[in-house]
Image (cartoon, grey):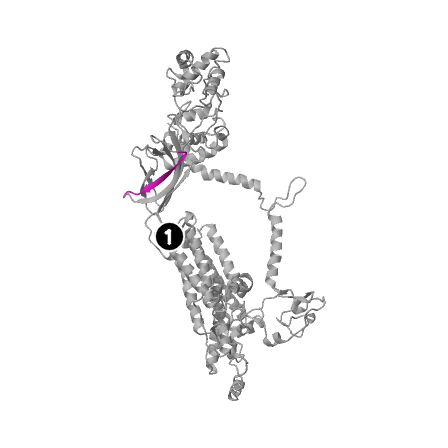
Amino acid sequence: MANASDPRVDARTGTPTTGHEWDGIAELNTPLPRWWLWTFYLCIIWSVAYWIVYPAWPGITGWTAGVWGWNSRTAVVQDLQELKTMRAAGEAKLSAAKLEDIEKNPELLSIARAQGAAAFANNCAPCHGAGAQGAVGYPNLNDDEWLWGGKLADIQTTLQHGIRWDADKDTRSGAMPAFGKDGTLKADEIKNVAQYVRSLSGLSNEGGADLAKGKKVFADNCAACHGDDGKGNQELGAPNLTDKIWLYGNSTAAIENRIAVGGGGQMPAWGDRLDPTTIKALTVYVHSLGGGK
Amino acid sequence: MDVRIDEKQAGESVSPATLVSGGAAPAEDGALYEARRQIYPQSVSGTFRRIKWIILAVTLGIYYLLPFVRWDRGPDAPNQAVLVDLEHNRFYFFFIEIWPQEVYYITGLMILAALGLFLMNALAGRVWCGYLCPQTVWTDLFLAIERLAEGDRRERMRKDAGPWNVQRVAEKIVKHSLWLAIAWWTGGAWVLYFNDAPTLVRQLATFHAPAIAYIWIAILTGTTYILAGFMREQVCLYMCPWPRIQAALTDENALNVTYRYDRGEPRMSVKKAKAARSLGGPAGDCVDCGQCVAVCPTGVDIRGGLNMGCIQCGLCIDACDNVMRKIGRPERLIAYDTDVNIQRRQAGMQNVFKPVRVRTVLYTVLILGIGGLMAGKLLTRADASLAVIHDRNPLFVTLSTGEIRNGYTVRFANMAPKSRHFILKVEGLPGSRFEVIGEDKNTSGREDLDIGPDQTRETRLLVFSGTAKPQGNSTPLRFVVTDETGKTVATAKDFFRAP
C-alpha cells in the first residue's frame, strides 16, 4: 500500500501520513480496522433502541412508556412483591409456630430475629434506640428488669396493647401519683422517702435524711404498688426499687422528681399497626436480646 | 497489518517537508479505516505444528470433558470434580472446596497465572499467544475445519475470488455447520461447570434446563463462532491487551521466533545462490518463496523483524524448514533465536543464551513463593470457623443484680461435608458465664452445638460477668470451639466491655 516516492508517505516507516503537519512533524496514518467503525455505528443504533424500549421522552402529561412498559417505580413494586413471595415460606412457618417453640428451633429463631430486627428498626428504635439500649424514661430492653414482665407472653401483650395507650382498652395502665404536685407529701417527707428508696439498693444517704421516717412514708404511700420490700409489681408496672436499674436515674434529684411529679411513659399499641406475625417476630427479637425471662 | 521496514526504504533520506501533502485530502491509501484483508493460512507440517496439535487436543480435551469427571465427597456434597456452585456459594476442585470468604485462593491463582505468563515471556516470548491462548486454539481448530471443507490456501483463494456455484455453497454450509456445532458445544461445556454435568446434559437434551443455561450457551456459541471463525487475528491485533503489555515486558535475551537475516540475506534464487557461493560472493539462504508468510495465521512477514502481529506460533519455522530441506540447506533459517545472537554471529562471536537472568529468577522465586504459600494454606485449611462480632450498641448492659453483660453475634461454619458436634467455651474472664440464645442455659461453662454438613449457624451469645470483676473497661476474651475429641478447630478473639 505504501509507496516510498509518494510525498504523503513517510519514507522512514513506509506508513502514509494524514496530511497534517506541525512544524515539520507529520502525523502517521495508521488506519483503524473498518469493523471497529461498524461496531461504533452499531452502538449508535443500539442506543436508539433504548428510546423505544425504555421510558425516554417527557411529554406534557407523562412520558413515553417504552414498548416493555418498564419503569423504576413498577420495578420497585415488583421487587417488593418478589421479596414478599420469597419470605412467605418463612413467614408461614413463623405464623404457625407456637411462641414458646420459636427460640428452640434455630431456623425459626433466625427468621424471627431477622424480621424482628427490621421491624424494630422501623418502629421501636426511635424511642428505645437502635440497639434497644433505651434512654432516660425509655426502658433498656437488653437488661433483665421488666416493668410489665419479661416472659414471651408478657412482651407480646405489651407490644399488642401498648402502655398507658388510651385508644386500646386492654392497654397496660397504672400510673405513679404526683405526690408532691397534688400535695399528698410534703417536701421533707419526699426527701426522707427518696433517701429510703436509695437505701433499698444500697445507695448512700445524701443530705442526712431520716431513713426511719422515710420508711414510714414508704409503707403508707408507696408499698401499695411497689410492695412492702420495694420489689415492685409487674401487674401495675411498678418498678423494682431494690435493683441496680433505674429508668429515670438514681440521683437524689431524679428520685425526688419522680415522687413529686409521678406519671409514666407511654407506648403505642402495635396490634392495630403491625400484623400478628411481625408482633411475634418482634416479641422473640426483644426476648432474645438477652433479658428475656 | 502491513509488513513494514524495508531496509532499503529506511535508508533513503527524505526531507520532512516532502512528507506532507500541504493539506490535500488523504489519498486512497491514506484512508482512515482499513478493510480487513482476508488471510488464507496454508497448511504445514513439522515439529511446531505437531506440538500445536498435541496442545490443542489436550487443552480442548480438558475443557470439554472435565465437567464429567467425578469426585466422591460423601453423600452431602456434589460429586463433580470441578464445580462452581453459584447457588450454594461453593467452588469445588477435586479435593479442594472453597467458600466465598476464601476468594483469596482465586486471587492467588490469578497472580500465579500472571507471573507464569511473565516467565514464559521472559524465556521464549509469546508462548501463550502461539500455543495456549483459547483464541489461538479455537482458531486453529476452525482453520482445520475450513481446510477440510474448502481446501487449502490456494483453493480457498481461488474459490473466494471466483463465482458462486453449488459446490461452493455446499462447502460453506458444511463449514459453518461444523463451526456452529463446535461453538455450541463450547458454550454447552461452559455451563456444565456450573451445575451437575450429567443432570444438566439430560435437562438440556429434553429442554428442561434453566433458561440461564440456554442463554449462556447462546452467548458462548455466538462468541466462539464469531471470534474463531471471523475475527481471528483481528482479536490479537486490535482487541487483546497482552501484545502491548508483552512488548513492554520483554527484553533482548528472550527467545523469539526470529528470521536469521545474517544467514538469509541477500535473498536470491537457488540457482543464483549456488553461482554466487561458487564465486565466494555473499549469498543468502532465503529464496524468497514466501512460504513463511503463506502459513502465517496472522499474515505477517517474519522477515520484517520482531512484529506485534506475530503470535510466535512457530509455523513459519516448520514451513521454512521444509523448504530448506528441499533445497539442501541447513534447517532453522527461521528459529527461536535472539537479535543479540544474530549481531554476535555477524561480529564473529559465539551464540549466548541466558535463560537465567534477574527477571526469570525473580518470576520463578515469586511463583514458587506464592505457590508454596497457597499450597501451605490449603494443606492447613481449617474446616471450621468462628466469627464473633461484639454488639455495637449497647456495648454492655447492667443487669438488676449489678452484673455486667455483653452481647455478641457469633457465626459458626462447619466447612466439612458431614454433620458435626462442636463445643464452645469462652475464656479470659474467670468467674464469668455465657449463654447461647436458643440453647438450654449451660452450667458447665460449655455450650454444645450441632451444625449440619457444609453449613453455617448464626446466633447470639451473651457473656455475663458473674462473680468476675472486670479490670478496666475492656478485657480480652477468647472464644474456643473444639470438636468431640477435644481438638481445637476454631478460635476467635473479642473483648468484654465494662463501664
| Residue holding disc 1 | B377
Q: Nearer the viewer, residue B177 or B423?
A: B423
The overriding secondary structure of the stretch rendered in magenta is: strand
Whether residue A28 is situated above or below residue A116 in the rendered picture: below
Image position, residue B143 (x, y; %) = 49, 68
Image position, residue B485 (x, y; %) = 27, 44
Q: Nearer the viewer, residue B470 or B438?
A: B470
Image position, residue B69 (x, y; %) = 36, 57
Q: Nearer the viewer, residue A118 or A53?
A: A118
- Let me know if residue B482 is in the magenta part: yes
- Choose top left, top right, bottom left or bottom right for residue B482: top left
- Let me know if residue B357 is in the magenta part: no
What element does badge 1 sit on?
Answer: helix
Q: Is residue B64 left or right of residue B6?
A: left
Q: Is residue B258 left or right of residue B80?
A: right
Q: Residue at x 36, y 40 (%)?
A: B478
Image position, residue A170 (x, y; %) = 45, 20
User: Among all residues in the image, which is located at the extreme front?
Assistant: A208
Residue B392 in sight from this viewpoint: yes
Q: Which residues are magenta?
A: B472-484
Which chain does tag 1 point to? B
